Amino acid sequence: MRVRVVSIGVVFVALLALLYVGLHHDPHMIPSPLIDKPAPQFTAQLVEPTTGTFSPSQLKGKVWLLNVWASWCVSCREEHPLLLAYAHDQHVPLIGLDYKDDPVAARHWLAEAGDPYDEVAGDPSGNIGINYGVYGVPETYLIDRNGTIVYKQIGPLTVHVLETKLLPMIRKLSQ
C-alpha cells in the first residue's frame, strides 16, 4: 500500500512539473530545424503582380523577409498593419507567400487592406510551406545574404518582436 501511495505521489509531482513548464513556455518559440540551414528553394507563380514567378534565388546576396500568410487567416489580418508600417520604412525586401489560398481572394484582400509586399508568391497546395516547416499562418522568416534562414517567427509579428528581435538582426546582417 505504501508503494502505491509513493507511486501516485511521484506521478502527481511529475504532472505538476510538466504543467509548470507548459504554462511558462512561449508557443511562438518552437525551435525550427531550418535555422542556420539554407532556405528551401522553389519557383512559384506570382499572385501580385499577376504575372511572372518568384524564386528565393532572385534575392541571393540580399537580406530579406518571407512572410507566410493567407486572406482567410485572422491572425494575418492582425499583423497586417504592422507589415504596412514596415513596408513604409522598407528595411529589407518583404516577400509574401500566400499559403493554401485562392489567388483571387488574396488579390482582393491586398487591394482592400493594402499591399506591403515587394512580391507575393502563391502556394495553393501548401507544398512550399511544408518545405519551410510552416506550422500555421502567419509565420515570418529572416533570410540572410547567403540564403540561410536565421530567424523564424511563428504567429503574428508584434511591435515588440519587430523592434527587439527582427530589426536588430536585420541591421546586423545588412552591414
Image: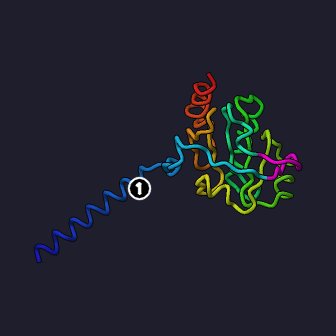
**Quarter of the image containing the C terminus?**
top right
10 on left or right of 113: left
Picture coordinates of residue 125 (x, y %)?
72, 63
Tell which residue pokes out farthest to the top in this image: 175
- Type of amino acid at the residue the image marks with label 1: Gly
Image quadrant containing the N terminus:
bottom left
12 displayed left or right of 87: left
Q: Is residue 114 magenta?
A: no
User: Residue visible at 54% across and 43% down?
Assistant: 37
Q: Which image quadrant is residue 140 in?
A: top right
Q: Majority secondary structure of the magenta segment?
A: strand
Q: Which residue is mark 1?
A: 22
Vertical comparison of 155 with 88: above or below: below
Graded by Cα atoms within 10 Å as few (under 14), some (14 to 19) or many (20 or more), the crowding at tag 1 reads: few
**Residue with the most extreme bottom position:** 1
Q: Residue at x 41, y 49 (%)?
A: 24
Q: Which residue is most to the left? A: 2
State which region is magenta: 45-54
Tell which of 103 and 128 is nearer to you: 128
The image quadrant of residue 6 is: bottom left
Q: Is residue 173 left or right of residue 71?
A: left
Q: Is residue 47 magenta?
A: yes
Residue 56 drawn at (x, y percent): 70, 43
